[in-house]
Image (cartoon, rainbow, N blue to C red):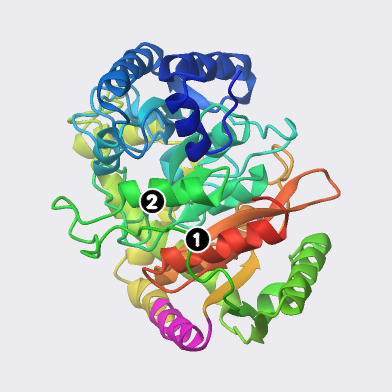
């Protein structure tokens, strides 16, 4: 029986008759049912997926492969519109809402022959680091069911980790692809801001949000990235540059100049084993002839506050549309006036974390505090951008741990939002400055959990990022 390891192998297996798309879909549907306790999927599109697989098998027999993702089984985080399907951002406030159109990424996936298998659980409105903020309940880490999978794209990460699909699409505003990839031992890429259209992605913080990719290996990430990137008339923030095509053949012997932030490795919140593993890997890189240098990054302590001021500000504005008038949850409580009516709908529809962020965001945007918080945070963001530019003038990439701790226990941090926010310390940087970042599952912790290393390159440099990533995966014996 065929077992998935990469898109390339799968395509060979389809071409030599070892498997079919229909057989593959049946396999994943049964896998998802067996792993129902993980709670990775909110909904499985079983009939649609089988029908599409049948069409693809027939088309292949007559006309050959139907695209770069022919028969590839893909899961979608519950924040990406798929026409005719329910879409809720794992929130009660959107219960029963149906997508009226496809997100651009969905059109692009389908145009290259992908099969969309289902809708994946996540933190409500993509706010969280543990997938405990979902109206559908938590997702469990497949490597240890007492631990969280990370968030907010926890369901999408676990689906790839537990072989419940081949690749998943999530969204990453401050780490929601890289952090769960780290906790689940898989590869997770957040592309450059503006690389992929956000049309049809439910907005959390629009100047940070980017759709990202989960896969088991770097080549599959590269194929998916090529398919879903590129200009879109529905999203003016998308770059006009052509989609990145990564063939992995060039620069195989290249020696890299790599930076790491000194303060990142000296941070008191960093788990000692993660620190040791990262330092040991730096030594291995140096021994292999790469030039790895420590760079000062005195702004580290400011990045979490800056991120949470700016993203909550944007969220408070983005989420104001959920008022229960045109769609979404409407309270049955009696009301006195319009404000009362909105209050009832929103109080019942949103979960605690979302409410906390709407209030924080409203506060930092309020007339009396705007300059003290929002304007100041924008300044820090600009400083970070300038500082980053200087680093990339000298280095090919920046490396760091992805997360300061391995996957923690369910409910361990759920009562302490500040502690939870610290889980994002290494990932929010890439979103603040708009650069691509990837988490590679290079390490294993004594708790038995996997953990990763993050690699970042300058804007629009996903191809060099993926080439370097493959080298690092090879050094760790993983590809
Ligand atoms: N954990 C971060 C947050 O809660 C990141 C979320 C995300 O990237 N969507 O905001």
* In the depicted structure, whether residue 119 falls above or below residue 204: above
Residue 332, position as x, y percentages in the image:
30, 19
- Residues 210 and 165: in front is 165
Chain part drawn in magenta: 381-395
- Residues 368 and 442: in front is 442
Whether residue 403 is visible to the viewer of this picture, yes or no, is no
Residue 418, position as x, y percentages in the image:
62, 57
Rendered image quadrant of residue 90: top left
Query: Could you say whether the residue bearing mark 2 is in a helix, strand or loop?
Result: helix
Asked if disc 2 and disc 1 are in contact, CB closer than 8 Å, the reply is yes
Q: Is residue 276 magenta?
A: no
Residue 182, position as x, y percentages in the image:
63, 50
Whether residue 137 is visible to the viewer of this picture, yes or no, is yes
Q: Residue pushed farthest left?
A: 233
- Residues 284 and 356: in front is 284
- Image disc number at residue 17: none
| Residue at 41% in and 69% down | 461
- Image disc number at residue 466: 1
Residue 77, position as x, y percentages in the image:
43, 36
Q: Quadrant of the N terminus?
A: top right
Q: Left or right of 128: which side holds 222?
A: left
Mark 2 highlights which residue?
225
* In the depicted structure, whether residue 231 falls above or below residue 156: below
Q: Left or right of 399: which side holds 281?
A: right
Dominant secondary structure of the residues highlighted in magenta in the image? helix
* In the depicted structure, whether residue 3 falls above or below residue 316: above
| Residue at 60% in and 78% down | 255
* In the depicted structure, whether residue 142 falls above or below residue 2: below
């Amino acid at each position: 029986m065929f077992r998935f390891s990469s898109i390339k192998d799968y395509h060979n297996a389809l071409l030599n008759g070892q498997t079919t798309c229909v057989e593959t879909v049946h396999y994943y549907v049964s896998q998802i049912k067996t792993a129902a306790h993980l709670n990775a999927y909110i909904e499985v599109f079983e009939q649609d997926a089988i029908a599409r697989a049948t069409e693809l098998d027939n088309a292949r027999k007559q006309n050959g492969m139907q695209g770069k993702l022919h028969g590839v089984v893909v899961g979608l985080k519950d924040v990406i519109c798929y026409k005719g399907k329910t879409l809720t951002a794992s929130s009660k406030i959107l219960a029963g809402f149906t997508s009226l159109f496809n997100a651009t990424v969905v059109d692009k996936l389908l145009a290259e022959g992908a099969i969309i298998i289902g809708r994946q659980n996540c933190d409500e409105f993509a706010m969280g680091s543990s997938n405990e903020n979902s109206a559908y309940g938590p997702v469990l880490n497949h490597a240890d069911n007492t631990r969280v999978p990370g968030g907010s794209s926890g369901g999408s990460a676990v689906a790839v980790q537990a072989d419940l699909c081949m690749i998943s699409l999530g969204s990453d505003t401050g780490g929601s692809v890289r952090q769960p990839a780290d906790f689940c031992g898989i590869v997770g890429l957040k592309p450059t801001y503006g690389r992929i259209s956000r049309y049809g992605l439910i907005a959390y913080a629009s100047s940070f949000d980017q759709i990202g990719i989960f896969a088991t290996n770097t080549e599959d990430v590269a194929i998916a990235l090529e398919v879903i990137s590129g200009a879109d008339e529905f999203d003016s923030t998308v770059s006009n540059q052509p989609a990145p095509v990564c063939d992995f053949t060039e620069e195989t012997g290249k020696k890299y100049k790599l930076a790491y932030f000194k303060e990142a490795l000296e941070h008191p919140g960093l788990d000692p084993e993660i620190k040791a593993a990262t330092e040991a890997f730096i030594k291995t890189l140096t021994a292999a002839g790469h030039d790895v240098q420590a760079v000062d990054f005195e702004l580290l302590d400011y990045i979490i506050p800056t991120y949470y001021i700016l993203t909550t500000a944007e969220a408070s504005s983005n989420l104001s549309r959920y008022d229960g008038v045109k769609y979404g949850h409407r309270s049955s409580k009696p009301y006195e006036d319009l404000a009362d009516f909105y209050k009832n709908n929103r109080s019942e529809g949103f979960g605690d974390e979302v409410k906390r962020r709407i209030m924080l965001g409203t506060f930092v945007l309020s007339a009396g505090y705007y300059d003290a918080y929002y304007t100041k945070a924008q300044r820090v963001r600009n400083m970070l951008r300038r500082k980053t530019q200087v680093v990339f003038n000298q280095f090919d990439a920046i490396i760091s741990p992805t997360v300061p701790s391995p996957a923690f226990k369910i409910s361990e941090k759920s009562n302490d939002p500040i502690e939870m926010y610290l889980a994002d310390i290494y990932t929010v940087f890439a979103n603040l400055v708009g650069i691509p970042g990837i988490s590679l599952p290079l390490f294993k912790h004594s708790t038995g959990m996997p953990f990763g290393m993050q690699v970042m390159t300058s804007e629009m440099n996903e191809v060099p990022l993926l080439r370097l990533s493959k080298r690092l995966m090879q050094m760790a014996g993983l590809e």
